[in-house]
Image (cartoon, grey):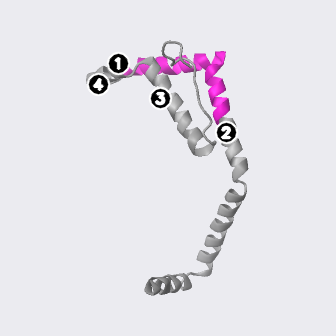
């Protein structure tokens, strides 16, 4: 362990002034991000909420429907094996689920796990 520490000290001692400056700049950026973390968390949380509200609003529903129709339209240009797999296993509900899960993962990582629910992928009146 002491040998490893000595190697690290020798390695750091060989840094040039420019390397130390860049290391300091990187450290300052990390400190700034860590210090303002709450602002970034709130920013990401609001982005997730706005995205969900957009998909659930009237205009957003049209955009969501257009995205699903675009995916279905583009499958016609794929090789026949891919078309069969997509048409067979990926329904409209599943496409909306994928969008919802993507937003949920984004929320879990950045926005304190805000629960995402996009209307249009419910089964038998759930949600």
* Residue beneath disc 4: 79
Q: Sequence-wise, which precedes: disc 1 or disc 4?
A: 4
Mark 3 to mark 2 CA distance (whole Å)? 19 Å
Which numbered dot is residue 42?
Answer: none
Magenta stretch holds residue 49: yes
Magenta stretch holds residue 100: no
Q: Sequence-wise, which precedes: disc 3 or disc 2?
A: 2
In this image, 55 relative to 46: left or right? left
* Residue beneath disc 3: 98
Most extreme residue toward the left, as rendered?
A: 81
Identify the main secondary structure in magenta.
Answer: helix
Q: Position of residue 121 (x, y in %)?
A: 51, 19
What kind of element bears circle 3? helix
In this image, 81 relative to 125: left or right? left
Rendered image quadrant of residue 51 = top right
Q: Which of marks 3 and 4 is in front?
A: 3
* Residue beneath disc 2: 45
Q: Sequence-wise, which precedes: disc 1 or disc 3?
A: 1
Q: CB of mark 3 within 8 Å of CB of mark 2? A: no
What kind of element bears circle 4? loop
* Residue beneath disc 1: 87
């Amino acid at each position: 362990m002491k040998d490893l520490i000595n190697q690290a000290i020798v390695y750091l001692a060989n840094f040039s002034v420019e390397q130390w400056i860049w290391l300091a700049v990187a450290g300052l950026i990390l400190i700034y991000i860590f210090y303002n973390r709450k602002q970034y968390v709130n920013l990401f949380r609001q982005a997730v909420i706005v995205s969900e509200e957009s998909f659930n609003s009237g205009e957003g529903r049209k955009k969501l429907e257009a995205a699903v129709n675009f995916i279905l339209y583009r499958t016609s240009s794929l090789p026949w094996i891919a078309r069969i797999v997509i048409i067979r296993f990926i329904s409209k509900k599943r496409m909306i689920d994928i969008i919802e899960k993507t937003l949920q993962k984004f929320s879990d990582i950045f926005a304190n796990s805000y629960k995402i629910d996009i209307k249009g992928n419910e089964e038998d009146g759930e949600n």
